[in-house]
Amino acid sequence: MAAALALSERGRGRTAPNPNVGCVLVKDGVVVGRGWTQPRGRPHAEAMALAEAGEKSRGATAFVTLEPCAHESARGPACSGLLIEAGVAEVVIALGDPDPRTNGKGAQRLRDAGIRVSEGVLEAQARAAMAGFLTRQSLGRPFVTLKLATSLDGRIAREAGKDRWITGQEARAHAHLERTRHEAILVGRGTFDADTPRLDVRLPGLEGRSPRRFILSRRPRENGDWEWLESPAAIAALESVDHLLVEGGAGTASAFLREGLVDRLLLYRAPVLIGTGTAALGDIGLADEARWTLTDSRSLGSDRLEVYAAR
């Protein structure tokens, strides 16, 4: 299942509105098929793995990160039906599908066909891997990651006219990798006007993974291929966006935190003290102290990355 979860990460930020699922087929202790949901949601992970395995699917065990779908679609058949047709002997599922069209029906359909079904294997990891899809299903909005690159004293920029970047090359490369894992990226109007950011992916071989670009502003206007949002709450209406990366500035970051719309924090911290400069956050309007859970911490060159999840 861990291998299936790793495969599912390949599709993150590219499969919405479908979930980024991974699937591994094993027969006689040998992996005979691998799959992950492809861009724009088709083919599904199970279909890809079954196609690779061919006749070796018969009698195999399928490890799937999400319950195989039970509903037919104009875009393709139900994966539970494909697994039955292929003759797999067992299906191991990490997480049930909350989509009412499948919710429990996929697993039951497999059982009714005489296939052994196990559920809940590495469930917590599957929830983390498919956080975008699950947040959309439960809250009706994308999963939001807020990225902050700060000095040790919590500044995101030096005085006007000074050096543009605080963090080093390794941290900036990691931030570009994060962009590939999101369907959309957003900055505030002030950041857009001051920095004219590109917000694309500039990693060799991944340039085609640049997300859609949005500006948060109460006064939308036409501006090339940029899209506009008038308020943080408007993210709920974004189509085919299950992962949104908010990159700045301080006003926009504060607005999303104030509305309780941040699920994950990426905090890049450079070993410098700035003093006078732009603070990372303004008033976020919390009556009680906000609590976050540290989920990852690592060095990136001379900088430090800390990742936090909302409680």
Image (spheres, rainbow, N blue to C red):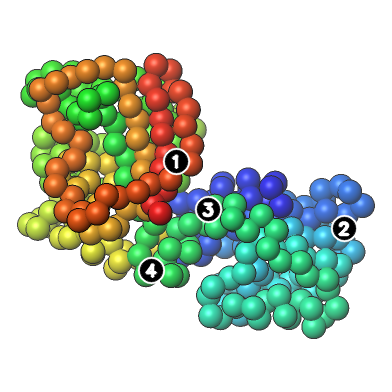
Among numbered discs 3 and 1, the one appearing first in the sequence: 3
Q: Is residue 163 above or below residue 216?
A: above
Amino acid type shown at disc 1: Leu
How far apart are labels 2 and 4 at the CA level? 40 Å
Q: Is residue 186 above or below residue 133?
A: above
Horizontal side of 74 relative to 50 (left or right) equals left
One can see residue 200 in this view: no
Give the residue pinned by disc 2: 56
Q: Disc 1 or disc 4, which is closer to the eye?
A: 1
Among numbered discs 2 and 3, the one appearing first in the sequence: 2
In this view, the residue in front, 190 or 139, is: 139
Label 4, secondary structure: give it.
helix
Residue in the picture at 31% in, 22% down: 270
Give the residue pinned by disc 4: 139
Give the residue pinned by disc 1: 294
Q: Disc 2 or disc 1, which is closer to the eye?
A: 1
Amino acid type shown at disc 3: Ala
Amino acid type shown at disc 4: Leu
Amino acid type shown at disc 2: Lys
How far apart are labels 1 and 4 at the CA level? 23 Å
Q: Disc 3 or disc 1, which is closer to the eye?
A: 1
Give the residue pinned by disc 3: 128
How far apart are labels 3 and 4 at the CA level? 15 Å
Q: Disc 2 or disc 4, which is closer to the eye?
A: 4
